[in-house]
């Protein structure tokens, strides 16, 4: 199942950045995460749980991850895991994110090819976002390199779309280069995209929406939303910003 | 720090495959893992903890992972994580595997480029194995594709070796095609390799060793060692097989 178009709230929780009302301890990280969920309900099309931000706090962090996921309830959850391994190992990762964490979607790295993505695609009712063109500077190192006359990220998209699947498939395409997104939409007008990079990473909302050309998409905002206000009134700010983003992102 | 050449015991623990003395419950998975470590101490150059196999059992599985890691003690530990994300997220993953799990080395996916691998390379005293040419069928989908006249996996190796680092760097190169490994060793004679694929995946020990041409390497065996004997005497078999593998893998 693909999420409805609009705002994806990225719950990249970082102890060092918590606003004033929260202490630098994992229990407060969890409280902050749940408060953000409450402040953005209705505005968020989906929530993105980036597993790294929880794993960095060891088992306590994993407990916070599961607690926040439970707090999200019925809203759509993307496990931003960027996993990918040989078949039997990817099957174990698919079980971890879809059965244990009960995510609706997962991000997957394509580097190891079909049998590494397959176990995620095999799960009916779930969604896989394969990394295509990411929003970071390192996307120039390999993703844009030409294979024949096709950039690797485009080869990845064409190849992945040719594989059998039981669930839905889409791609991660960064918002930091609107011209590329626009070009990509002429070739893949209907591919569901997870578009990170708006806010702190430099992507502009309006430019990104124009470049997206009404294709199915969720637009992730993490740091630019969560840490916009370090004061006691942070949750009001987060609520207001989420509503504004959501209003801009309707189409 | 790079591990000494020889046998890497892959602790790919799977409830469905546990030998007769163990029940199908996570507490027994942990017991089996610790018993395997005891049966292979001395023979193993290092242990590879594939995080997927623990994550698939949720928080109980993560607890087993940490308990087994502690049981391994001072022996060299590779966290087989295949992570890779934008810079600040990779930094969080690096913290998770090096500080929380206290691994000596980690496997990382190159797809997102330099700033996704950098935070792992930045940690002094630690080791990063970047995915180059993997042992699975899907390695044909992208890794072997030509960028100009260079296969992508070779471009990955050359590029990664050109990046600054504070720790050590090596590559994951599968054992399932000895001719390719041999060719790769002529170009990268000194690169430390993590070579999976021996045993169940089809790689032959002697052929792989010959192809490796005395380059620094650890050879991972997982299923072919752990589940070779389903009976009460499984630990004697595992001990004996590990000693045999280790003897074959000395050079």
Image (cartoon, coloured by chain):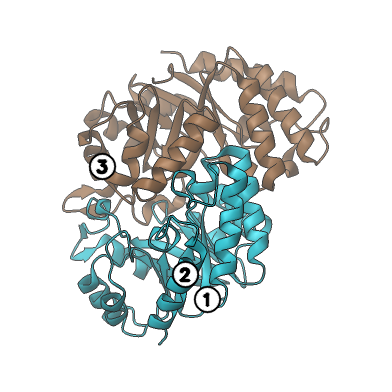
Chain colours: A cyan, B brown
The residues tagged by marks 1 and 3 sit, at their Cα atoms, a distance apart of 38 Å
* Chain letter of the residue carrying label 1: A
Relative depth, front residue between A105 and A145: A105
Q: Residue at x 28, y 71 (%)?
A: A204
Q: Position of residue A186 (x, y in %)?
A: 27, 81
Q: Residue furthest front?
A: A232
Residue B81 locus on image (x, y percent): 49, 41
Tag 3 and tag 2, C-beta contact below 8 Å: no
Residue picked out by circle 3:
B154
Are marks 3 and 2 in one subunit?
A: no
Residue labelled with disc 1? A3
Q: Is residue A230 above or below residue B226?
A: below
Q: Chain of mark 3?
A: B
In the depicted structure, whether residue A60 falls above or below residue A70: above
Q: Residue at x 43, y 16 (%)?
A: B4
Q: Name the residue that disc number 2 marks.
A: A8
* Nearest the eye: A85 or B99: B99
Regarding mark 2 in the picture, which secondary structure is present there? strand
Chain bearing tag 2 is A
Residue A44, image x and y in percent? 51, 73
Nearest-to-viewer mark from 3 and 2: 2
* B222 or A190: nearer the viewer: A190
Tag shown at residue B243: none
Query: Could you tell me which secondary element the residue under label 1 belongs to?
Result: loop
């Amino acid at each position: 199942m693909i999420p409805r178009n609009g705002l994806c709230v990225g719950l990249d929780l970082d102890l060092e950045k918590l606003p004033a009302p929260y202490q630098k301890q994992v229990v407060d990280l969890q409280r902050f995460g749940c408060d953000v969920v409450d402040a953005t309900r209705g505005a968020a099309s989906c929530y993105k749980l980036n597993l790294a931000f929880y794993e960095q706090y060891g088992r306590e962090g994993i407990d916070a991850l599961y607690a926040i996921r439970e707090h999200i309830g019925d809203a759509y959850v993307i496990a931003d895991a960027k996993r990918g391994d040989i078949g039997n190992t990817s099957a174990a990762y698919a079980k971890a994110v879809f059965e244990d964490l009960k995510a609706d979607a997962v991000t997957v790295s394509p580097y190891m090819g079909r049998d590494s993505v397959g176990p995620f695609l095999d799960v009916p009712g779930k969604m896989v976002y394969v990394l295509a063109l990411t929003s970071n500077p390192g996307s120039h190192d390999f993703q844009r390199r030409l294979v024949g006359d096709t950039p690797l990220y485009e080869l990845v998209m064409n190849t992945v779309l040719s594989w059998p699947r039981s669930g839905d498939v889409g791609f991660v395409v960064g918002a930091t280069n609107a011209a590329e997104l626009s070009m990509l939409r002429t070739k893949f007008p209907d591919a569901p995209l997870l578009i990170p990079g708006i806010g702190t990473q430099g992507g502009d909302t309006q430019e990104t929406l124009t470049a997206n050309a009404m294709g199915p998409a969720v637009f992730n905002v993490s740091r630019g939303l969560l840490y916009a206000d370090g004061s006691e009134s942070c949750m009001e700010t987060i609520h207001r910003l989420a509503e504004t983003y959501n209003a801009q992102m309707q189409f």
